[in-house]
Structures are given as C-alpha cells and as structure tokens.
Image (tube, rainbow, N blue to C red):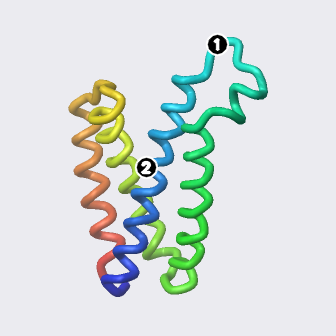
C-alpha cells in the first residue's frame, strides 16, 4: 500500500475511534427516561452519525484502491485508540492488560500488512 493509502486508512480508523467516543458521550447525555426527541436532539449522537457516514465513504474509497486483506487489519488500531481516548477524554480507567493487548495488536497488524 502507498503511503497515501496507509494515511487515509489510518484516518478511517481514527474516525471510527472518535465516533465511538461520540457515541459514549451521547449515551451519557441521554436521560434515563429518554424519549424520541432526546435522541434526535442529541448533538453528540448526530455528530457520531455524521462522522461515521463520512468515514464509511472514505473507507469505500480506500477499498477501491487496496486489497481488503491489507486494509482491514488496520481497523484493529481502533481497539487501541478507543481505550486511549476513553482514558484521556472520558476519564475512564484503563487496565494494564488493555495496553498489553494493544502491543499484541500492533504486532499483528505489522505482520499482516507488510509484504
């Protein structure tokens, strides 16, 4: 894969990870007895949907230019970014085993994406 394609693939991964944080923010903001208008007026939820939509379009473009077998392993980086973002942005705790798993994911993606 070219550097441009790798960069755009990583941008997709980043968009998916940010989208997950936005979905969590949306869930936090919803009241326990949420009604229809609470959902449709939730700016975090709307933002997550827009970001996921744009990311999906970019992902389809990436797949036009890269084999799925090379591009898809990069999506595993979302399993690293989401816990890091949840720690930094949402102040959630992250355990040591999450970081160990992240290192294993990086090794796996490196093995599958090199030719």
Q: Report the residue at 69% width, 26% height from top.
A: 38
Q: Report the residue at 69% width, 31% height from top.
A: 39
Image location of residue 75, percent across then percent down:
44, 60
Give the SS element for disc 1. loop
Above or below: residue 51 compared with residue 10: above
Image location of residue 16, percent across then percent down:
48, 53
Please name the residue that numbered disc 1 is placed on.
32
Badge 1 crowding class, 10 Å Cα cut-off, few under 14, some 14 to 19, many 20 or more, is: few
Q: Could you tell which of marks 2 and 1 lies nearer the N-terminus?
A: 2
- Quadrant where the C terminus lies? bottom left
Q: Report the residue at 60% width, 54% height from top.
A: 50
Above or below: residue 85 compared with residue 104: above
What's the CA distance linking mark 2 and mark 1? 25 Å
Badge 2 crowding class, 10 Å Cα cut-off, few under 14, some 14 to 19, many 20 or more, is: many
Above or below: residue 110 compared with residue 2: above
Image location of residue 59, percent across then percent down:
54, 70
* Of residues 11 and 37, the one drawn nearer to the viewer in this rendering: 37
Please name the residue that numbered disc 2 is placed on.
17
Query: Viewed as shown, does residue 24 lie left or right of 34?
Result: left
* Of residues 88 and 76, the one drawn nearer to the viewer in this rendering: 88
């Amino acid at each position: 894969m070219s550097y441009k394609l790798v960069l755009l693939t990583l941008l997709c991964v980043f968009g998916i990870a940010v989208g997950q944080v936005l979905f969590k923010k949306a869930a936090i903001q919803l009241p326990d007895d949420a009604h229809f208008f609470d959902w449709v007026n939730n700016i975090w939820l709307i933002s997550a949907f827009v970001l996921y939509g744009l990311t999906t379009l970019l992902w389809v473009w990436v797949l036009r230019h890269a084999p799925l077998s090379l591009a898809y392993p990069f999506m595993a980086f979302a399993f690293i970014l989401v816990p890091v973002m949840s720690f930094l942005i949402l102040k959630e705790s992250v355990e040591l085993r999450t970081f160990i798993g992240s290192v294993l994911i990086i090794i796996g993606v490196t093995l599958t994406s090199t030719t």
